[in-house]
Amino acid sequence: MTNQTNQMITAHGLTKTFRSKGQTVEAVRSVDLSVATGELVAFLGPNGAGKSTTLRMLTTLLPPTAGEAIVAGCDIRTDPAGVRRRIGYVGQGNSGGHTQRVRDELHAQGAFYGMGRRETRARSAELIESLELAQVANRQVQSLSGGQKRRLDIALGLIHRPELLFLDEPSTGLDPHSRANLWEHIVELRRATGTTIFLTTHYLDEADQLAERVMVMDNGAVIADDTADALKGSLAGDRVTLTFDSPSDAATAAARIGGEVDGADARVVTVTAPGGDRALPRYIRSLSDAGLEVAAATHRQPTLDDVFLALTGRSLREEAAAPAASAEELETAAA
Ligand SMILES: Nc1ncnc2c1ncn2[C@@H]1O[C@H](COP(=O)(O)OP(=O)(O)OP(=O)(O)O)[C@@H](O)[C@H]1O
Ligand SMILES: [Mg+2]
């Protein structure tokens, strides 16, 4: 089957239920999604939301309990080999042998995909160049920094020139500088080759700035799917924060303007308002008419965390940016 539509991924009712040791985990619950050819989509969500499980089904590493998906023109159920030939996948955590040299690792990966020796060498050289690995090409993988390792992982995922690249938390655990550098490479790759990229991240600011579309997953379901701007505009609104000299002033003010007293500091009131920059002077006037003096005021644009908060009542930032520890072990147990 060839990819006749402009959809790189379409999935309907994708479901994964794990049963292990008498327990049932509904990891992914009837997910529908579509990704157009050439898109850069970020999959966000707290630990255990089901992001990796969704990716593992789309990449044919896990059979779905129910549902269907066409990935790069191939059906994940009936043509998993076709899917694997056309996609690259860089899993959560590190791939790559430890004592192999970087260049040899790339050559081995090419051989794995059945590429000829000359083609593999040429392609490896190209990736070493474009992912800035030249200085470490003859070093052992275990001696690389976190950012260099992740760039090697991406090179490994790209060796066979896939149309679609899945990256599961490519930037987790890197320092801000390496994260920014990795993203430059991802964005440049996208620009130069038009590769469709579907990635997961815990970093809301990355998803906000760099992805063309954001899908938010929580508790096994996709709960939002749009551009970051559209999500922020429709779900979150601007945040105005007002500080008063006393908690009693704050409580009176909160009642008057429909805000909420901050849980951590009872002198602080926050209120969500569309066009918060204009609303702010209005609030201050109205409160001053009521004899309440505002000691300090700030206004800020909504973030994707505000979107998640609006959707679920919880903050994504409070969730640790660490992978759910036992998923891999559980998988072995369930297999
Ligand atoms: N093989 C497995 N057996 C049993 N449960 C599993 C297995 N793999 C994942 N789970 C469970 O399914 C749920 C979703 O896990 P998944 O790894 O997809 O989440 P995630 O969104 O990728 O989380 P993180 O952000 O921590 O990587 C979790 O409750 C997890 O413990
Ligand atoms: Mg994961």
Image (tube, helix red, strand yellow):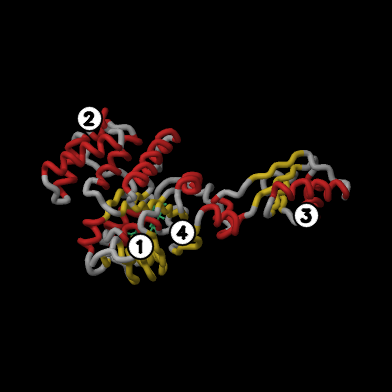
Q: Residues within 10 Å of mark 3 (few under 14, many from 20)?
A: some
N-terminal of the pair, mark 4 or mark 3, is: 4
| Tag 4: amino acid | Met
Q: Badge 2 is on which residue? A: 139
N-terminal of the pair, mark 2 or mark 1, is: 1
In space, the residues marked 2 and 1 are separated at their CA atoms by 41 Å
Q: Is residue 27 above or below residue 262?
A: below
Q: Badge 1 is on which residue? A: 6
In space, the residues marked 1 and 3 are separated at their CA atoms by 48 Å
Which residue is painted at 26% across and 46% down in the image? 158
Q: Is 266 on the left or on the right of 304, as rendered?
A: right
Residue 28 rendering spot, x and y as whole percentages: 40, 64
N-terminal of the pair, mark 4 or mark 1, is: 1
Q: Is residue 179 above or below residue 327?
A: above
In space, the residues marked 4 and 1 are separated at their CA atoms by 24 Å
N-terminal of the pair, mark 3 or mark 2, is: 2
Q: Badge 3 is on which residue? A: 257
User: For the residue with label 1, is its CB less than 8 Å from the closest atom of ligand 1?
Assistant: no
For label 3, the SS is: helix
Q: Is 121 on the left or on the right of 224, as rendered?
A: left
| Tag 1: amino acid | Asn
Q: Badge 4 is on which residue? A: 217
The quadrant of the rendering that contains the C terminus is bottom left
